[in-house]
Image (spheres, rainbow, N blue to C red):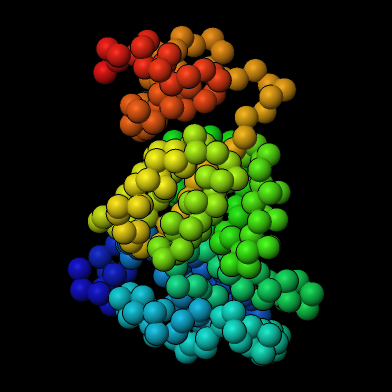
């Protein structure tokens, strides 16, 4: 497929073209801020509606205009862009609001993922709410949600923590507050900080706490490493972290509730975790931790488990 907007539309099946022609939420309205989710790695994840909105707004506010220009060029979209990021949000936010009040439409995009999630876009949305400016979303990629669904950990209840504070005191307070958190926790981390973060997590939550380390999501080298904190610390002592990570951390067990494994035999308990993608040794360690018995007792009962 030649990458330009007209050819993309020409090559789409009629059912998709009909969807784009619908007047409901596909029509761009003046005086509206559009929060447009962009791909987190695979450009083909940009939705048809996102292409329609990005092609139709008066201007685009981008975290990094150079990065966003590559995305827009790929889809043959040419629109005026301004930067909106952490370092200019206080100045640029009111400027965007004034243009919206004058009847222009704006799409807000980040380098990757959903605007306003761990992103200064939340300030712009709050400002729109205060000023009575319309805001609507064009949903799509979100690295945290993608990682959660792939983690093999409970998804019914979770909390998003983003990046931990770089201030040691604030970081300690944040981790202490999470020590008894029962929901699955989502965190982001840069590769050069991963080892220190894993060490802090192991110190706070214990080495047997389960974690999934997700990197290169939606890309060719996507990797989901399901393990325990202790083994993750050991692994990255000999392996260099590469790429941005989403860490999906198991929550604390609610001591007032009956554990899901109460009716399981020990082999069934271990098999449950293996079926979720954990390695056999990690599954044995998790089972031992939850049952409060030595790992050797678990090993003895699953020696023949495949």
Who's the residue at 44% across and 41% down the image? 230
Report whether residue 274 is seen: yes
Res 6 visible:
no
Where does residue 293 sit, x and y in percent of width and height?
A: 51, 17
Instruction: Indicate the quadrant where residue 206 lies.
Output: top right
On-image quarter of the N terminus: bottom left
Residue 161 vs 88, above or below: the answer is: above
Whether 188 is drawn above or below 106: the answer is: above
Q: Residue at x 68, y 49 (%)?
A: 176
* Depth check, front residue: 32 or 179: 179
- Along the line of sight, which residue is nearer the eye, 130 or 219? 219
Is 271 left or right of 198, judged from the image as shown?
left
Please report the residue visible at 78 percent of the width from the left and 78 percent of the height from the top.
Answer: 131
Query: Which percent across, then down, holds residue 173?
Result: 70, 56
Image quadrant of residue 107?
bottom right
Residue at horizontal 20 percent and vertical 73 percent from the top = 2
- In this rendering, the answer to whether 91 lies above or below 262 is below
Expressed as whole percent of the image width and height from the top left, the position of residue 263 reads 54, 10
Q: Going by the image, does 168 lie left or right of 57?
A: right
- Answer with left or right where residue 173 lies relative to residue 105: right
In the depicted view, which residue is nearer to us: 267 or 39? 267
Point out residue 266 in the picture as x, y percentages from the top left corner: 44, 12
Q: Quadrant of the C terminus?
A: top left
Q: Nearer the viewer, residue 172 or 93?
A: 172
């Amino acid at each position: 497929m030649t990458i330009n907007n007209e050819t993309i539309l020409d090559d789409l099946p009629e059912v998709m073209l009909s969807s784009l022609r619908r007047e409901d939420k596909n029509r761009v309205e003046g005086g509206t801020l559009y929060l447009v989710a962009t791909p987190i790695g695979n450009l083909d994840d940009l939705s048809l509606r996102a292409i329609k909105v990005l092609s139709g707004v008066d201007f685009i506010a981008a975290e990094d205009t150079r990065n966003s220009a590559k995305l827009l060029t790929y889809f043959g979209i040419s629109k005026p862009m301004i930067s909106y990021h952490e370092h200019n949000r206080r100045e640029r936010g009111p400027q965007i609001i004034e243009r919206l009040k004058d009847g222009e439409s704006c799409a807000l995009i980040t380098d990757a993922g959903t605007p306003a999630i761990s992103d200064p876009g939340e300030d712009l949305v709050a400002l729109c709410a205060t000023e009575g400016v319309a805001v609507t979303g064009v949903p799509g990629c979100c690295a945290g949600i993608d990682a959660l669904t792939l983690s093999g950990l409970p998804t019914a209840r979770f909390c998003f923590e983003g990046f931990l504070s770089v201030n040691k005191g604030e970081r300690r307070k944040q981790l202490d507050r999470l020590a008894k958190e029962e929901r699955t926790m989502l965190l982001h981390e840069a590769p050069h900080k991963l080892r220190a973060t894993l060490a802090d997590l192991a110190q706070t939550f214990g080495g047997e706490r389960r974690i999934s380390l997700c990197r290169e999501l939606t890309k060719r080298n996507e990797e989901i490493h399901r393990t325990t904190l202790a083994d993750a610390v050991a692994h990255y002592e000999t392996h260099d972290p590469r790429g941005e990570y989403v860490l999906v951390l198991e929550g604390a067990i609610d001591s007032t509730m009956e554990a899901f494994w109460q009716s399981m035999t020990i082999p069934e308990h271990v098999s449950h975790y293996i079926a979720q993608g954990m390695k056999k040794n990690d599954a044995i360690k998790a089972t031992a931790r939850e049952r409060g018995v030595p790992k050797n007792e678990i090993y003895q009962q699953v020696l023949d488990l495949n």
